[in-house]
Amino acid sequence: MAQRVGGADVRVENLTAPGAEPHDLELTPRQVAGLATADLVIFQSGFQPAIDTAIPQASPKRTVDSASFLTLLAATDSDGRAGSAKDPHTWLAPSNLVTITEHVRDALIEARPAASQTFTANAAALIGELTTLDTDFRRGLATCAIRPFVTSHAAFGYLAHAYNLEQIAVRGLEPDTEPTAARIAEVQRLATANHVTTIFFETLVSPVVSESIAADLGLVTDVLDPIEGITADSRGTDYLEVMGSNLTALRKANQCS
């Protein structure tokens, strides 16, 4: 969003390296110092502890904290229950990205008023694409024969909420935490009871557990990408492309006409 809205008038630096698991981010002293001199820092509090610690230390000129204006859902824990923690994966509902884009646009205009027309036009173009993506999801998932889907970790709560689906997560918020035998058995029971066809895995986490569950049940596996990092294995080169691939995968798995 920063790059699309800012265009040639901004230089965007990602604190999370490509292919790295963002939940486990650690910042270098140079990165923390860079926060203090940046014109704008875009983040989501409650997602990456290293960022939450560094922001008060660095006191950047401007911030856009998406957790401060989005409605956060309760996170699903490792047992599949809604806990007291909040789910940070807000970007998996395109409508949330529309709201974030508006805040990024306004912050960039404040930082560089001379480019306000460019930022406004760029934001409008991106919002149009995100709105089309949201429409594609609503129409594409409206007639699914199966509403639940099984995913590697509990990253898809906002997507499920937005499009009337049900997420069954093998793991909780942390993608690299090994599920208990009891949780695997419960996922298998739910998958069978709901006639699930596919066990989803993701590109940044080992697929071994998902493959094992699928093999035990005689099901197939496929990728459902939480877009926590774009790599050579991603089914697309940016958010819009990968989300389009996610829609295709869900429509196939959930037998959507």
Image (cartoon, grey):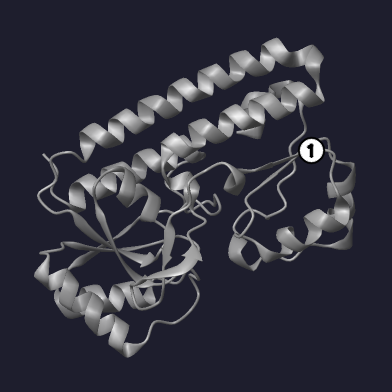
Let me know if residue 21 appears in the view: no
As drawn, is 183 to the left or to the right of 154? left
Q: Nearer the viewer, residue 95 or 210?
A: 95
Name the secondary structure under disc 1.
Answer: loop
Left-right relation of 68 to 92: right
Residue 115: x and y in percent read 76, 14
Q: Residues within 10 Å of mark 1 (few under 14, many from 20)?
A: some
The residue type indicated by label 1 comes to Arg
Quick check: 192 left or right of 152? left
Residue 60 at x, y = what percent?
84, 44
* Residue 119 screen position, x and y as percent: 67, 18
Going by the picture, which residue comes out furthest to the bottom? 181
**Residue designated by label 1:** 62
For the point 65% across and 61% down, the residue is 48
70 vs 228: above or below? above
Q: Quadrant of the N terminus?
A: top right
**In this orientation, which residue lies closer to the viewer: 77 or 14?**
77
240 to 152, vertically: above or below = above
The residue at 31%/29% (across/down) is 135
Which picture quadrant has residue 112? top right
Front one among 50 and 197: 50
